[in-house]
Image (cartoon, grey):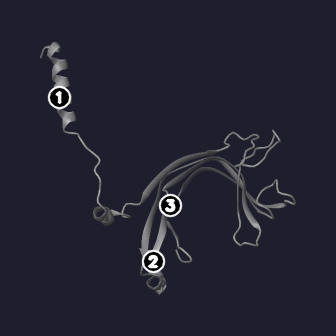
Amino acid sequence: MNRRYLMPVFLVMVTCGAAQAVAELDRMEDGDLARVSGQGGIYLSGDISINEMGGPMENSYFGRCNDSGKKCGARLAYRLKADGGWMVLDEIRGNFAFEGLTLRVRSIDSGFGGDGELFNRDVMEIGLPDVVRYNDVRFKIAGSNMPRPTDPGFQQTDILSVEMQGEVIMEGNLLVFPTGNP
C-alpha cells in the first residue's frame, strides 16, 4: 500500500471505532436505584503522609512544636466516657498507603451463636485492605487528662512508642454495630 493512503485509512478506522464507543449518563428512577443500592459498597485506596520529613510545625490541627530538633506530628485524642480521661495517639508521622479498603452495609439476621437473629439489623462492614505499606510511620500511645497540650494543667503519660516499616497483609472484615435509636 502506498504511504500517502496510510494516514487517511488510519483516520477512517479511528473515526469508525470511536463512533461505536459512545456512552451517556442517564437519570435512574428511585425504583431502579433501590434494586441495586448497597450491593457494591465503596472501594477506597489511599496514600497518606503526615509530617513525613519531621521538624517543627504549628497549626490548629496538629498542635504546637517549637523545638526544631524534635520530630513532631499529628495528635488524635479521644475520650470513651464523658467524665473519663483521654486516650491519645500522639506525634503521628510518616507515610502509609493502602488499596482495597471497602465499606458496605450488611444485614445481620443469623449466626453469631444465635444472637444475629435477635439483633436483626444492619451493620457497617469495613473490609480490610489486602496490603498496607508503611514508610517510617511513628506514633505514641498515651493517656492524658486534657485533649490538648496547650490546655492548663495538662499531663500526659506515654504508654507505648510504635515504629512501623514495610508491608502488612490484612484479611477479614470489621463489623461496626450501631447503638441507640436512629
Dot 2: within a 10 Å radius of its alpha carbon, few (fewer than 14), some, or many (20 or more) residues?
few
Find residue 74 and name its label.
none
Q: Earlier in the sequence, mark 1 or mark 2?
A: 1
Q: Report the residue at 46% width, 82% height from top.
A: 116
User: Measured from the top left, where is residue 3 in percent x and y?
Assistant: 17, 14
User: Measured from the top left, where is residue 111 in percent x and y?
Assistant: 44, 81
Q: Which residue is mark 1?
A: 13
Element at label 3: loop
User: Measured from the top left, where is residue 169 in percent x and y?
Assistant: 52, 57
Element at label 1: helix
Q: Report the residue at 52% width, 59% height from top.
A: 170
Front residue of this view, candidates 134 and 54 = 54
Mark 1 or 2: the one toward you: 2
Q: CA distance from mark 1 to mark 3?
A: 45 Å
Q: Are marks 1 and 2 in contact (CB under 8 Å)?
A: no
Q: Does residue 28 sit above or below 121 in this rendering?
A: above
Asked whether residue 172 appears in the rendered view, the answer is no
Front residue of this view, candidates 166 and 142 = 142
Q: CA distance from mark 1 to mark 2?
A: 55 Å
Find residue 121 and name its label.
2
Mark 2 or 3: the one toward you: 2
Residue type, numbered disc 2: Arg
Answer with left or right where residue 162 lies relative to residue 115: right
Q: Earlier in the sequence, mark 1 or mark 3?
A: 1
Q: Does residue 60 sit above or below 107 in this rendering?
A: above
Q: Are marks 2 and 3 in contact (CB under 8 Å)?
A: no
Q: Which residue is mark 3?
A: 128
Dot 1: within a 10 Å radius of its alpha carbon, few (fewer than 14), some, or many (20 or more) residues?
few
Q: CA distance from mark 2 to mark 3?
A: 22 Å
